[in-house]
Amino acid sequence: MAKFTKRQKNIRAQLDLHKAYSPGEALTLIKQYATAKFDETIEVHFRLGINVKHADQQVRTSVILPAGTGKKVRVAVVTKGDKLKEAESAGADVVGSEELIPRIQEGWMEFDVMIATPDIMGALGKVGKILGPRGLMPSPKAGTVTFDVGKAIKEFKAGKVEFRADKQGIVHVPIGKASFAPEALTHNMAALVDAINKAKPTAAKGTYIKSVYVSSTMGEGLKVDSGKLGELATVIA
């Protein structure tokens, strides 16, 4: 049986963990009870009505969070030719070509996002089994395989987040920090819900968004009333 700290017991005593809250209520409460000694990350978790065993029911895409993530994102770019200079000018943390591949094979992972141009993807396939399980393999669908590397770098630095459903059909996405204003978290969640809906596979049948929870790094998870997600549409209208 799980053991709770005094702080956790105090939080659990003040929250109704069986209630389904509106998005605004859930974010307000999660922010209020994110009382750890560091700036906790706020995450949203979606359980989707998809069968990830089928290729036509995969969910993998990205979203630009209007208020950013609150985290410094390290961007690595693998490219060649004139695009090397473009990547450096756009502020990439690491820029290189095929010489980066042996480093990755040796365990180098000093980046959060990898962007690659299409003309080097063949060579990058050598480390697909290393990058793939970590969610770092560049993908056209996620916007990380592109010739417009300057734009991609700026978007990820500004708050673009890539996400995909795991083997259970669950999507976990950070939408900011506990120090964010409630309005900032609301705008980020609204953008995320919009992206989730747009990523719905045509082959998915029945209820698409089955459940939604909001949590903080050291806090509880609060259930969000899926029927009230539509309230967020007015935020991005």
Image (cartoon, rainbow, N blue to C red):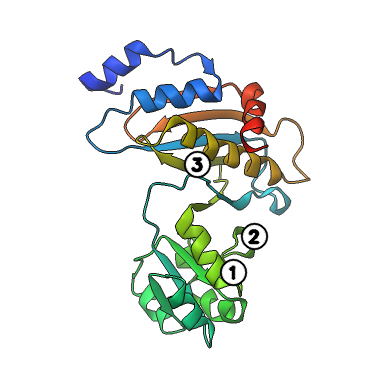
Q: Residue at x 54, y 50 (%)?
A: 163
Q: Nearer the viewer, residue 159 or 129?
A: 159
- Left or right of residue 194, residue 4 in this image: left
If the image is split into quadrants, where does the N terminus sit? top left
Q: Nearer the viewer, residue 217 or 181?
A: 181
If the image is split into quadrants, where does the C terminus sit? top right
Q: Which mark is residue 119?
A: none
Q: Which residue is mark 3?
A: 172
Q: Position of residue 229 (x, y in %)?
A: 63, 27
With respect to residue 122, does 190 lie above or below? above
Which amino acid lies under the numbered mark 3 shown in the image of this protein? His
Residue lying at the far bottom of the rendered structure:
81
Q: Position of residue 62 (x, y in %)?
A: 58, 52
Q: Residue at x 53, y 18 (%)?
A: 21
Q: How many marks?
A: 3
Which amino acid lies under the numbered mark 2 shown in the image of this protein? Lys
Q: Secondary structure at mark 2?
A: helix
Q: Which residue is mark 2?
A: 141
Which mark is first along the chain, 3 or 2? 2
Q: Nearer the viewer, residue 64 or 173?
A: 64
The reply to whether residue 160 is visible in this rendering is yes
Q: Position of residue 232 (x, y in %)?
A: 62, 30
- Left or right of residue 3, residue 112 in this image: right
Q: Position of residue 109 (x, y in %)?
A: 36, 66
Q: Label 3 neighbourhood size at 10 Å, few (<14), some (14-19), many (20+)?
A: some
Which amino acid lies under the numbered mark 1 shown in the image of this protein? Val
Q: Which residue is mark 1?
A: 145
Which mark is first along the chain, 3 or 1? 1
Q: Residue at x 45, y 76 (%)?
A: 89
Q: Nearer the viewer, residue 202 or 71?
A: 71
Q: Secondary structure at mark 3?
A: strand
Q: CA distance from mark 1 to mark 2?
A: 8 Å
